[in-house]
Amino acid sequence: MRRFGILSLLACTLSICFIACTEEESELGMGLQDPGSIFDGKVCDTITATAVTILDDSLLTSNYSVGVIGYYHDDVFGEVKASMYTQATLSTPSTGVSFLNTTIDSVVVTLVTIGTFPNSSDSNAIHNLHFEVNEIMDDMYLDTSYYATDYMNLGDKYFEGNVEFRATDTIVSLKLDETMHDKFANKEFTDNANFLETLKGLCIKMNYEGLDDYMLYVNYWATATAMTVYYTDNETYDTSQYVFLFDKTAAHFNRYEHNYSGTPLSIFQTNRTDSIQGNESLYLEALGGTAIKFRFPYLMEWGKKHPHAIIHQAELFVSVPDEPINDNCPSSIICYRYTESGGFVAVPDMVDGVLSEGFDGKFNSESRSYRMRITRQIQQMLTGVAPDLPMVLYANSRRSSANRCILSGTATDKPMKLKIIYTE
């Protein structure tokens, strides 16, 4: 009777209503305890997975706080180019700004950097980066969704030149060409709409030929990420400055371009809807690169053999081979499930729940693996609450991090593995 009471309590606890999820790309959960220390249950770790590599298509990049700019190339994932498209908006929208009867001295774009790819072991190493700044010719809208494959038509070029950068640097300054002064000279802007008629926005990117493979992570919302106009009053000769912002009041998005020619992923160069079988290797890449689509084809059969099973813990393990390219693997990964309508939502375990423990998903450097707790997802599939459809793994922070890695395939000596601890 006592054992029955405990199991009943656990069953009630595990049947808590499941919380619907929206995507949150932040730190996910806490480390998990060894489930063997919590439950004295049976263990099943023979449920095999099938998996393929697919493109991470239709990645929304508009109005996030972090952007990426630069270029990187390797023999496995090919090359990726990242560029920023952003409006500049008034820092005093309610009062506007006047440059009447002034002389424009200079216009400077500054970018606050919060990281680089790859991380440099030598913080004093100098990277020679070639920046370009062009005027955007198309209207941008704050309430419009923009994706990693979107772009805008470009007009005049206001900056092109080399900038020396060290990993310890936190600011990139780009002094724009004097032709930009005409956008402000003897003009008055009453509000953002008025100003955006004059300058719709800027595209900031790097020229890549013959220069360092390097990417910068830029904080759009930092106060110092801005365009500053320096000017002199023609009567008093006083000097002043006015700041235009790239923050939440400005529409912005990032464009990511991938070239997989000559790589194991070359099929995506001609067919974006294709997939690559994952028996030997699976490829996970951020910035609208690749994702892992997987399922457990025999899970429902296992459920029929154990109709009264109470799932205490279901963990997904994915191994990371010890290869040089995996020195830059994502710090964590996230998991989504397909819906019957063809979309996808986060698995319920990505919101902390039953055991006051999180989804995890963090890379363990000692075991060289990722571990994800998907207990509620598996329970919902077995009980029919969720359909028996594939799930997808993504690199966490995939909009704002260039990390990528090769994962062990499903037919290797360390395959993708589902471990279930249950009682019945």
Image (cartoon, grey):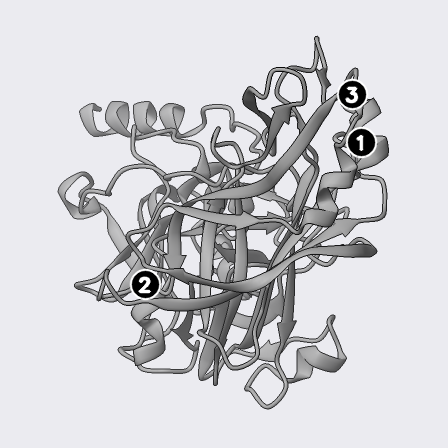
Q: Which mark is residue 189?
A: 3
x, y (%) of residue 323?
A: 30, 80
x, y (%) of residue 329?
A: 36, 64
The residue singled out by tag 2 in the image is: 45
**Is 325 or 210 nearer to us in this picture?**
210
Q: Residue at x 18, y 47 (%)?
A: 34
Nearer mark to the viewer, of 3 and 2? 3
CA gap, disc 3 and disc 2:
66 Å
Q: Is residue 300 visible?
A: no
Position above or below: 338 against 3: below
Q: Residue at x 75, y 81 (%)?
A: 270
Nearer mark to the viewer, of 1 and 2? 1
Quarter of the image for residue 144 reads top right
- Quarter containing the N terminus: top left
Give the farthest residue toward the bottom.
Answer: 262
Amino acid type at circle 1 is Leu
Q: Which mark is residue 196?
A: 1
Label located before the other in sequence (1 or 3): 3
**Is 56 or 78 nearer to us in this picture?**
78
Q: For mark 1, does the 10 Å Cα neighbourhood hold few (<14), some (14 to 19), or many (20 or more) residues?
A: some
Q: For mark 3, does the 10 Å Cα neighbourhood hold few (<14), some (14 to 19), or many (20 or more) residues?
A: some
